[in-house]
Amino acid sequence: MTRTIESTFLDSARTRLCIHLTGQIRTCLAALKIEQIWWRPNESSNAIGNLVLHCVGSTRFYIGHVVGKRDFVRDRQAEFAERRELPAAELLARLDMAIREADDVLAQVAPESLLELTERTPKPMTLIEAISLQLAHYALHAGQIAYATKLLDADAIHEIWRTTPGH
């Protein structure tokens, strides 16, 4: 297969989302105790657990539903409202399910379809815009999770950006 800008973009987005950034989140969850995963500095802030649930919801929406045209009804408010201390294993199971779906969808996207418009979003956008939006959004929250992990335990993660797969 001849490499194109479109196929290179899809390969890069898939690697970043499904391997590298998710690897960072997995590393952080593995390094923390349950009370640290659900710690919040104040009631207006999100716990790491909420950010993981939000990453699951946004990935299932933008990649699974929008790009992959799969059925998914998102409850965004519930992602942030969760106050039960769900165990890391449950958060990882949800994250893994969303990432398996995203990996499957991104593997099947035809590079020539990236400029197609979708109306599965609040405002019409191209598939490349939806993928780019989710990749940037997911990276932002992965960074927040890593930063909060370092605040909670300075020695919990080391060189996370260099040591996770796909970098």
Image (spheres, rainbow, N blue to C red):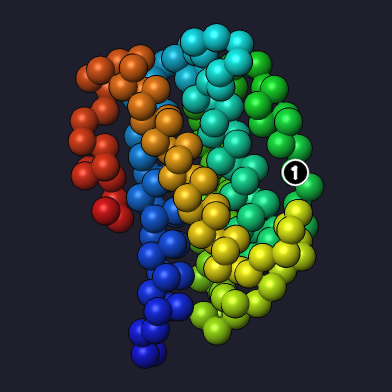
> Toward which corner of the image does residue 8 lie, by quadrant?
bottom left
Vertical side of 95 occupied by 151: above or below = above
The amino acid sitting under disc 1 is: Arg
* Residue in front for this viewpoint, 131 or 69: 131
* Residue in front for this viewpoint, 5 or 64: 5
Would residue 148 appear left or right of 55 to someone viewing this image?
Answer: left
Residue at position x 71%, y 36% in the image: 76
Mark 1 packing: few (<14 Cα in 10 Å), some, or many (20+)? some
Vertical side of 114 occupied by 12: above or below = above
Q: How many marks?
A: 1
Vertical side of 70 occupied by 24: above or below = above
Residue at position x 22%, y 19% in the image: 155
At which x and y percent is residue 132?
51, 59
What residue does disc 1 label?
A: 74
> Toward which corner of the image does residue 81 lie, by quadrant?
top right
Residue at position x 44%, y 45% in the image: 139
Q: Is residue 92 visible?
A: yes
Residue at position x 67%, y 31% in the image: 79
> Toward which corner of the image does residue 68 lie, by quadrant?
bottom right
At which x and y percent is residue 11?
41, 69
Would residue 19 appear left or right of 66 to someone viewing this image?
Answer: left
Would residue 98 appear left or right of 32 to someone viewing this image?
Answer: right
